[in-house]
Amino acid sequence: EAGVAQSPRYKIIEKRQSVAFWCNPISGHATLYWYQQILGQGPKLLIQFQNNGVVDDSQLPKDRFSAERLKGVDSTLKIQPAKLEDSAVYLCASSFDRGQYNEQFFGPGTRLTVL
Amino acid sequence: AQSVTQLDSHVSVSEGTPVLLRCNYSSSYSPSLFWYVQHPNKGLQLLLKYTSAATLVKGINGFEAEFKKSETSFHLTKPSAHMSDAAEYFCVVSDSQGGSEKLVFGKGTKLTVNP
């Protein structure tokens, strides 16, 4: 079974530039998550989709971050404009909804450096 | 809100000696707790989970954790460390408030295994 795919793996941009990350979840997984992991910290949930609808985006900085999941499959996370403090690893995860607990499977992440 | 505190940011052991990674949780109800491992440049992987069944939970690669309600702890142990265990370990609690299930990560414990 193929895992969660993310691209690019690394990105370096200057502050105030825009950047986009792509995620393709495991086939059949209805729920997709984007996390931000700042160096030295645990991942923090940014946004959760179920199919193509947003379930939770309470921690997404909506003035500069946006995400979409058209057709309920792959997803794009965008930052516009980027700030220095956005330097982090952006992780995508997906889960198959089957009841009480749905294990999340994580992709390798995209490491963003903002200069 | 649910939270976890990992008591050690770094743990160093010798190969073949026991591993203990400590985690305390804060929860207003019976929590679901997890341990994830993150190897360099790889995605997060679920080690084990506690979801109100047996309090001693066995995971992959010889790891286990014990849920102790009286101590609000969920420490991760392994009898004998292997070089391949060197990684970052995250204690995680599931927060189901607001209708969506959200994982809340601790800050992580970096495990070093010395030959």
Image (spheres, coloured by chain):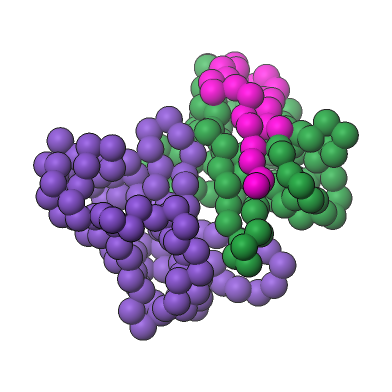
Chain colours: A purple, B green
Seen at 71% across and 39% down, the residue is B26
Q: Residue at x 42, y 78 (%)?
A: A52
For this view, does B16 lie left or right of residue A107?
A: right
* x, y percent for residue B110: 51, 27
Residue B8 counted in the magenta span: yes
On the image, the x and y values in percent for residue B40 come to 40, 37
The segment highlighted magenta reads: B1-24
**The residue positioned farthest toward the bottom in the image shown:** A71
In the image shown, does B29 or B49 lie closer to the viewer?
B29
In the depicted view, which residue is nearer to us: A69 or A65? A65
Please determine whether, in this image, residue B68 is positioned above or below residue B80.
Answer: below
Image check: A67 left or right of B90? left
Q: How many marks?
A: 0
Q: Is residue A110 visible?
A: yes
Q: Is residue A109 above or below residue B96?
A: above
Which residue is painted at 83% across and 31% down in the image? B71
Residue A77 appears at what percent x and percent y?
A: 30, 61
Left or right of residue B96: residue A46:
left
Q: Is residue A71 magenta?
A: no
Please, is residue A18 above or below residue B90 in the view? below
Q: Could you tell me which residue is drawn at 55 percent across and 60 percent down?
A: A104
Q: Nearer the viewer, residue B33 or B97?
A: B97
Could you say where residue A15 lies in the image, as x and y percent from the top left?
14, 42
